Image (cartoon, rainbow, N blue to C red):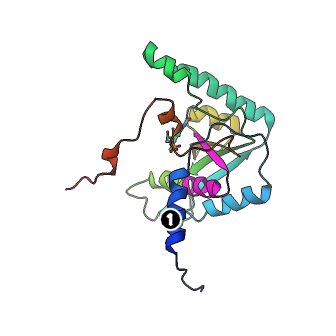
Amino acid sequence: MMHEPQFSHDFIRTLETLFSWRRDVRHFKKDPIPDVILNHLLSIACMAPSVGLSEPWRFIQVKTPKIKTEIYDLFKTTNKEAAQNYTSEQQILYNNLKLSGLDDAPHHIAVFSEENPTQGMGLGRQTMPQTTAYSTVMAIFSFWLAARAYGIGVGWVSILPPQHVKEILKTPDHWNFIAYLCVGYPQFTQDTPELENKGWEQRNPKRKEWIIR
Ligand SMILES: Cc1cc2nc3c(=O)[nH]c(=O)nc-3n(C[C@H](O)[C@H](O)[C@H](O)COP(=O)(O)O)c2cc1C
């Protein structure tokens, strides 16, 4: 058993800076990330909590250029369809957003969650089966934050139809699609969300207030 670590005030301040500078990144440099770092980020992701210690996350590194292109094409089609659901005025703004880094990110990582893993023996999810997906999201967030600490950007792409992604990646039926991540060194860094900078949406200060019951 290791000694319990003491976290200094300086460390806590730095950690808070990491939280505030974590960004969804959509503009990447082409330079690849060394395998040793990518593997390390995956091992940090696996430190995440999971319901019943089920570790339901399944990380796929998509390396085949043809598959990457298929996913990017699928995104473009889906994104075009998504734009149709806005007014013509909103469409002008929407079409000005870059909603994925699939074109330039050197690494594509698809994340799935096993629906009913034997690991964990069902503990904690008899009442809330969705907790396996929640556990996988915890792993993604750990990956995301750790990546930022290493100067690496992560962008979450959800503008993809899950069934189609599953077919392209030939995943088992009982794996739920959770996220498609673009990963690489960012072209630039910013301390405010891109959607805010582009005038789409802004953080609501009310969300920092407790709701009391
Ligand atoms: C579940 C989830 C899905 C997301 N899907 C997309 C997406 O498809 N495209 C995109 O550009 N950003 C996506 N994002 C990123 C959000 O737009 C981003 O987190 C938000 O605008 C706040 O910006 P920040 O992450 O830089 O703080 C997603 C984020 C989450 C958590």
Residue type pointed to by label 1: Arg
Determine which residue is flagged by label 1. 13
Q: Is residue 154 magenta?
A: yes
Image coordinates of residue 1 in percent, x first then y, are: 59, 86
Along the viewing direction, whichever of 183 and 30 lies nearer the viewer? 30
> Residue 211 appears at what percent x and percent y?
25, 52
Q: Residue furthest left?
A: 213
Q: Residue at x 55, y 21 (%)?
A: 95
Task: Name the image quarter holding residue 104.
Answer: top right
Residue 116 percent location from the top left of the image? 53, 54
Q: Is residue 158 left or right of residue 101?
A: left
Q: Is residue 98 above or below residue 89?
A: below
Residue occupying the point 27% across, 54% down: 210
Per the image, is 136 magenta? no
- Tell me which residue sits at (66%, 51%) in the image: 59
Q: Secondary structure at mark 1?
A: helix
